[in-house]
Structures are given as C-alpha cells and as structure tokens.
Image: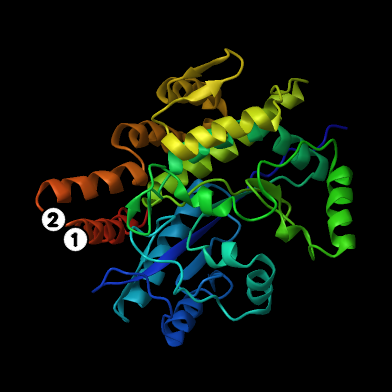
Amino acid sequence: MAAPAPSFTLGIEEEYLLVDRQTRDIVPDPPEEMLQACAAVAPDQVHPEFLRCQIEIGTRVCGDLTEARKELVWLRRSVAEVADRYGLAPIAASTHPFAVWLPQKHTNRDRYNMLARDIGAPARRLMICGMHVHAGIEDENLRIDLMNQVRYFLPHLLALSTSSPFWQGQDSGLKSYRLAVWNELPRTGMPEEYHSFGEYQQQVGALVEAGVIEDATKLWWDIRPSSRFPTLEMRISDICTRLDDTLTVAAFYVCLLRMLWRLRRGNVAWRRYRNLLLEENRWRAQRYGFDGGLIDFGRGEIVPYDELLNELIGLLREDAEALGCVDAIENARDIVRRGTSAHRQVAVYQEAVDAGATPEEALRRVVDWLIEETLFGLEPA
C-alpha cells in the first residue's frame, strides 16, 4: 500500500527583540513581571529566549496558513500590548540597528546556563532573532528524504526574509548579518545528506554517546528533523518584520515540500548537490539577499532572483492551490518589488542621513520604523 500523504500542518516560531521606546535601545534586563504577563497571555506559546532581551512566540499546530495567520496576529499583538504597558516594544528583526552585545544577560535556566558555559563568547554574541517553520511530515524516512532535497531551495527562502543589515551601529554590507553570528556556533549550516532516518539517528547517537550533546536539539542546522514533533523544521530564515512576509516564507517552504513529495510519488527526485555548491548560494543570499541573483546549477550560471522566483511560483502553483496559499506565494513578487526588511532598514537610514540626521539619529529612526512595521497588518483576517 502507498504511504499516506503527509499532513503538511504548520507551526511557526518567531523571536523578537525588546526595545525601550524612549532610547530605542535593547533592554538588557526587562521587568520580570512583564515577561510573566506575556507568558500568561498564552501559556506554552510565549517563552523567554537565550538572552533576556528576547522573547519567543510559537503557534499551535495549524491546519493551514489562514489558521497560522490568526495565531501570529494574536501573539504579536498580545506581546506588543503587554510590552507597551512597560514602555517597551517588540521588534521583528534579526539584529538591532545599534545595540551592543556585551551588556546583554542570558536567561537563568539550566539549558541556557549550559549553553553559555559550553559555547563561551559566541553564545554571548547571540543578540539575533530568527524564524522557524515546522511542516508536518509524519513518516520519518520521508522526512529525511525531503530534507535532502529541499536544502537546494533554502537560500531562496533566506533571500526573501533578510532583516539584519546592521550590527552594533554599522551597516554590515550583508543582508543577513544574523547568519555571520550564527555561523560561529558548532553544528550550524547545511546538514549533510542522509540515506535514512536510521542513519541520521546513528550519527546523532554517536555525539550523544561521546557526551558532547544531550540530544538532537543541539543540532542547529538550517533545517532539521524536529526532535519534539513529527515535523521538518526550517531554520535558515531571518525573522520577517512584516507579518505577511512571514506567511509568504512559510507558504513557500510547505509548498516546496509538497511539490517534492508530489514528484516523489512519480519516482522523480530533485537533483542533489554537494554542500560546497549549496553553501555558495547560502552565502550569496546572506550577502546580497536577492540583489545578486543565485546560481542555477542546472544551467551553470547566476540567474536574477526575480527570474528564479517566477519559475518557482510556476512550479508550486498546483501545491499552493491545494494548500490554499496562492495569495501568500504571490506576495513574494511584492517583497522583491519593495525590498525585504533589510533593504528598507538601509533605505530608512539613508533617507534620514540625507535629510540631515546624524548617524545615531538615523539609526533610532530605523528602530522607530521597525516598531511600526512589526505591527503592520495585524488586523484579524
């Protein structure tokens, strides 16, 4: 008998930085009662992150993108409303425009204390936020097979999501400086190709047995089989400042998985490439976003991103219709037209400087823009 189709359910996690509305700087030690009030809004869905200046939200298991949107609207608004009572605001950006990492404090939990001890300074530099998308794929071996194939498209997703051009008051020249910080940690980047879930478990078990990790949650790859849920978790993307862009990236990811599963039913697989090649596109997306194009390895040349996007939208049309997310997929064209958060942050900064603002004033205006944009479009669907 043919294996049942994956559910392709969705779960989305977002991490926010907490800023002071007066100074626009990060708050190294927000009031404990504020964090408790946020957690009380949605028990088990709002959590502290590694640094105390961060807060994480996660949707419940969602049957489709419409349900995921309702969850994210409610969670973003709830956190913002609680934070506002304390003169704070969440920003959905993968780095802060000018905050300094050294004064930040990590959350006093066993897991985070262990992380700070084991990793050292690279962990203390983790003043970065990401977005993770879980897609429900119940069959373990199918999960591995689709992970092997979808790696090719992860740079395409990163390019749509970039929101970290600044680091400690400087334009880094990268659209995703977050990855530069993240890459300092072990067990990051593209995963290897595995032939089965059993082989993957065997490799994880070797590290556990050696005592270097406790479990598979310490594998911080760009994509990984979740160790808590029957899902494949995409982790490469920056957090999108605008909610609709979050939903677009999530829609692309789940549609890509469905497309690869659909081809697999016809005994067709996406061509696999070595990490040397995949990492080159990862770097291009990190450095240029979608501005520099990505390498099409079938054609052996760099292709403009909008051309690749048009091809992808065509490939995914059937899957977007089946999953009810055609509009979210089409929104990718709008992202390319107006720019990601990274593009727009740099533009806000430059416009302020051109108007006579000092660099410090211009950076504060970027924070103001991020506060406003984080709440953009949060009306119920």
Relative to 115, residue 315 above or below? above
| Quarter of the view holding residue 280 | top right
In the rendering, at what x and y percent does residue 190 appear? 66, 41
Residue at 48 percent of width and 58 percent of height? 129
Seen from the viewer's position, the closer of residues 252 and 102 is 102
Q: Is residue 259 visible?
A: no
Type of the residue with mark 1: Glu
Q: Is residue 96 shown left or right of residue 185?
A: left
Residue at 78 percent of width and 20 percent of height? 267
Mark 2 neighbour class, 10 Å CA radius: few under 14, some 14 to 19, many 20 or more: some
Q: CA distance from mark 1 to mark 2?
A: 6 Å
In the rendering, at what x and y percent does residue 271 appear? 70, 21
Q: Secondary structure at mark 2?
A: loop
The quadrant of the picture occupied by the N terminus is top right
Residue at 48 percent of width and 26 percent of height? 313
- The figure's colour scheme reads rainbow
Type of the residue with mark 2: Ala
Q: Residue furthest bottom?
A: 33
Looking at the image, do the residues carrying marks 1 and 2 touch, with CB atoms under 8 Å apart? yes
Q: Is residue 338 visible?
A: yes
The residue identified by callout 2 is 357
Q: Secondary structure at mark 1?
A: helix
The residue identified by callout 1 is 361
